Structure formats: C-alpha cells, structure tokens
C-alpha cells in the first residue's frame, strides 16, 4: 500500500529541486517570523509598562499643581492658564483623552484595535448568543468572554497573546498591553 510519505517524495521529485529549496526557505522564514513576533510581544509589553509609568508619574507630578490651584482659589490668587489647563487634563484620565483600553485585539477581516473587553465584545461578538445587548442581538458579556477563554482576567500576563474562537465563529487574538 502506498503511503503519504512516498507520494510526497514522488511529488517533490516531479517538481524538482525548487520544492526542496522552497521548503527549506519556508522553514527559515517561519523561524524568522516567530522571532519577530516574539520581539513585537516584548516591545509591546515594554511600551505598556512605560505608558503605565508615565501615567503614574504624571499623576504624582500634577498632584502638587492641583493642590496649588485649590490654595490659589481659596486665597484669590490668579492661576496661570497653563497650570489650570494641566490640572484639567489630569482630572480627565491624566492625558485629556478617553482610555483606549488595556487589550490589543486582532481578528481576520478587521483592523486591529485597542479596547477593554466589554467594548471589544460589542465590536466582535454580534450573533454569539450572549445575554447582553439592548435588542437581544447576542453580544457576549465580559463574564461570558472570560468563561469562554477559560481563564480569569487577573491571570493574564502583560504582553501575553491569547487566541480564542467566539461562538459566532470569529477567531480573535488579544494581548494585554496595560495593567
């Protein structure tokens, strides 16, 4: 009886040495790609740590500004505009912008994005049969998502990538990029 390995050898002989060269080059490229993916994960983890540290330092540095503004308001002292604006930004999530979320999401057919689990589920899980959604459209809840992943959110390490298939068939890879 003919085996697959024998068929493969016959096919390789028919295609010629190009098939062997292509297989060898493919192995090299896959190895290089794995190294690059590992480096990307490391860099994203480092970036997330630096962003977190920046927020911590901004909060501490701007605490003095907020206290000085409060004292100046009580004493009727004029507050320079740049300090007033700085304190306003601090009270609005540290940088004047809405938080984008602590996970990086990728799914075939969609542009990658950054979001919390709840916002990502609204975007990714329509038709999944979950319990959320004002019209019962089946968006997974945060609890349903973590149950599907089979892990608790606190057990996910910074920079760790996890791939899961949602009940609607969508394959999703997410990575924790902030604590």
Image: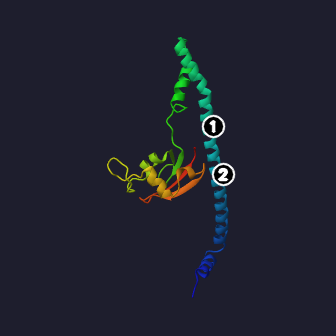
Query: Can residue 82 be seen in the rendering of this structure?
Result: no
Residue in the image at 61% along x and 34% along y = 56
What crowding class fits label 1: few (fewer than 14 Cα within 10 Å), some (14-19), or many (20 or more)? few
Q: Earlier in the sequence, mark 2 or mark 1?
A: 2
Please tell me how crowded label 2 is: few (under 14), some (14-19), or many (20+) other residues with Cα within 10 Å: few
Figure quadrant of the N terminus: bottom right
| Between 137 and 148, the one nearer to me in the picture | 148
Residue drawn at point x = 67 percent, y = 58 percent: 32
Which of 50 and 40 lies nearest the eye of the viewer? Answer: 50
Q: Is residue 105 visible?
A: yes
SS at mark 2?
helix
Quarter residue 59 falls in? top right
Q: Is residue 62 above or below residue 30?
A: above
Quarter of the figure with the C terminus: top right
Secondary element type, mark 1: helix
Residue occupied by mark 1: 53
Which residue is pictured at 58% across the width and 83% down the height? 3
- Image location (x, y in percent) of residue 43: 64, 47
- Residue 104, x across and y down, in percent: 54, 48
- Would you place residue 10 above or below residue 160 in this image? below
Is 35 on the left-hand or right-hand side of 124?
A: right
Side (left or right) of 103 relative to 167: right
Count of numbered labels shown in the rendering: 2
**Which residue is disc 2 drawn over?**
39
- Do the residues under discs 2 and 1 have CB atoms within 8 angstroms? no
Rounded to the nearest whole Å, what is the CA distance between mark 2 and mark 1?
Answer: 21 Å
Instruction: Find residue 39 and report its horizontal and vertical position in percent.
Output: 66, 51
Would you place residue 134 above or below residue 60 in this image? below
On the image, the x and y values in percent for residue 37 come to: 63, 54
Q: Residue furthest bottom?
A: 1
């Amino acid at each position: 009886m003919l085996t697959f390995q024998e068929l493969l050898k016959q096919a390789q002989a028919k295609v010629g040495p190009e098939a062997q060269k292509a297989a060898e080059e493919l192995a090299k490229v896959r190895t290089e790609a794995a190294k690059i993916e590992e480096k990307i994960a490391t860099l994203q983890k480092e970036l997330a740590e630096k962003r977190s540290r920046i927020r911590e330092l901004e909060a501490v540095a701007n605490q003095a500004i907020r206290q000085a503004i409060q004292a100046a308001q009580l004493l009727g002292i004029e507050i320079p505009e740049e300090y007033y604006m700085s304190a306003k930004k601090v009270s609005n999530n540290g940088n004047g912008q809405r938080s984008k979320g602590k996970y990086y999401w990728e799914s075939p057919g969609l542009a990658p994005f950054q979001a919390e689990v709840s916002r990502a589920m609204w975007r990714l899980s329509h038709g999944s049969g979950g319990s959320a959604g004002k019209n019962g459209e089946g968006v997974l809840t945060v609890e349903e998502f973590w149950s599907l992943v089979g892990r608790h959110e606190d057990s996910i390490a910074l920079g760790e990538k996890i791939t899961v298939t949602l009940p609607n068939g969508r394959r999703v890879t997410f990575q924790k990029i902030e604590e």
